[in-house]
Image (cartoon, rainbow, N blue to C red):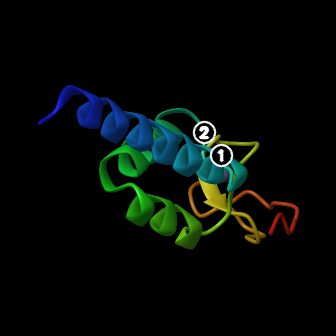
């Protein structure tokens, strides 16, 4: 592969990776989960972005720090009551 073409391909992958990363972050994904979305966007480009748009919003349970759906009122991990919030 031509070096310039390779550079352009990697640059586009970086951009789509960052877009997927930003969308996942907006949906409450943090840390390794958000980093994974960078990889998905990097590898699958527009398909990675499309996939990140389809994931549900999550929030972090204040009691056990596990991710739960943003509209959950009970934590599925520890059973704590959560405040319903709509981040969509
Ligand atoms: Zn919990």
Could you tell me residue 7's position as x and y percent?
32, 29
Could you tell me residue 80's position as x and y percent?
73, 57
Q: Nearer the viewer, residue 12 or 59?
A: 12
Q: Residue at x 30, y 48 (%)?
A: 43
Give the SS element for disc 1: helix
Kindly identify which residue carries mark 2: 30
The label on residue 79 is: none
In this rendering, position of residue 47 left or right of residue 59: left
Closer to the chain start, of discs 2 and 1, is 1
Depicted 65 relative to depicted 75: above or below: above
Q: Nearer the viewer, residue 41 or 57?
A: 41
Q: Nearer the viewer, residue 77 or 26?
A: 26
Q: Residue at x 72, y 67 (%)?
A: 74
Q: Residue at x 61, y 69 (%)?
A: 56
- Residue 34 in view (yes/no): yes
The label on residue 25 is: 1
**Callout 1 crowding tier (Cα within 10 Å): few <14, some 14–19, many ≥20:** some
Tell me whether circle 2 and circle 1 mark residues in contact (CB < 8 Å): yes
- Quarter of the rendering occupied by the N terminus: top left
- Quarter of the rendering occupied by the C terminus: bottom right
Quadrant hosting residue 11: top left
């Amino acid at each position: 592969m031509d070096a310039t073409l390779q550079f352009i391909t990697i640059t586009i992958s970086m951009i789509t990776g960052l877009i997927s990363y930003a969308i996942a972050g907006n949906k409450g994904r943090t840390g390794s989960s958000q980093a994974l979305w960078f990889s998905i966007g990097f590898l699958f480009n527009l398909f990675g972005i499309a996939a990140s748009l389809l994931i549900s919003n999550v929030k972090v349970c204040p009691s056990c720090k596990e991710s739960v759906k943003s509209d959950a009122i009970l934590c599925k991990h520890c059973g704590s009551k959560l405040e319903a919030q709509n981040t969509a």
